[in-house]
Image: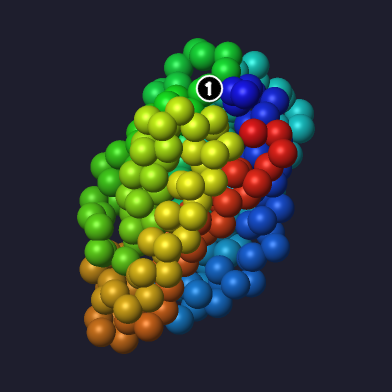
Amino acid sequence: MGCTATDMIGALHAGAATVSAHRDELIQLDRVIGDADHGENMDRGFRAVVAKLDTAVPETPGAVLKQVATTLISTVGGASGPLYGTAFLRAAAAVGDALELDGPAVAAALQAGLEGVVARGKAVAGDKTMVDALIPAVDAAKAAAADGAAPARVLALAAEAAHAGAEATEPLVARKGRASYLGDRSAGHVDPGARSTALLLSAFAESRSV
């Protein structure tokens, strides 16, 4: 079964609920290696996304993704807003005007989102950023889609890989962002952006609407 605009809106509601539930965890992760605002910023941004989607319902998955992007960019401060906003904007462009997304389209959207984050943040694998969760997620999504998996399965395997990628950031020394100022002291902590990426993908995958 494909993913429609209605399905995607349901998934975003699930994502917002997950971010809210993990708000304090994300704040704590960011407190030790950043400026402690990641959980608050993400929660505020996704609450705004849900409020926007409750009042203006886009007709295509691409339009939903574009609305999410503009909302996050306008409501989320720090690095998270531009990075997540760019990811959703690139994903919107990748899916175009399609009314329903199949597995390969979902994988292509994730690939485009990753490319947007890399273009915006200039991070590479091993820098201890959300890219370390997104790269394995995209690889898993593309493999699943190539095997004929439906969108929910593509997202489930992407989420599983993203969680492993996020956990793998713990021993890394940050080379990007505020965490990089800590040098070796940044090791021993999971990157909050990688963690929020994995949480969102899990929520999207577990949403009954997708």
Tell me how many marks there are. Answer: 1
* Residue found farthest to the front: 147
Quadrant assignment, res 139: top left
The outermost residue toward the right is 54
Residue 27 horizontal side relative to residue 52, left or right: left
Tell me, yes or no, if residue 166 can be seen here: yes
Q: What residue would you read off at disc 1?
A: 101
Instruction: Assess disc 1: are there few (<14), some (14-19) or many (≥20) residues with their C-alpha within 10 Å of its C-alpha.
Output: many
Q: Position of residue 33 (x, y in %)?
A: 40, 77
The residue lying furthest to the bottom in this view is 185
Given residues 194 and 37, the one toward you in this image is 194
In terms of image quadrants, where is residue 23? Answer: bottom right
Instruction: Please report the residue visible at 45 percent of the width from the left and 81 percent of the height from the top.
Output: 32
- Which scheme is used to colour this image of the protein? rainbow
Residue drawn where x is 49% and y is 55% of the image: 160
Q: Secondary structure at mark 1?
A: loop
Q: Is residue 48 visible?
A: no
Q: Residue at x 60, y 44 (%)?
A: 205
Estimate the x, y position of residue 51 in percent, counting from the top left.
Answer: 73, 39
Between 21 and 204, the one lying in front of the other is: 204
Q: Quadrant of the N terminus?
A: top right
Report the residue at 68% width, 59% height from top.
20
Side of 207 relative to 172 (left or right): right
Residue type highlighted by circle 1: Leu
Relative to the observer, which residue lies in front, 145 or 136?
145
The quarter in which the C terminus is drawn is top right
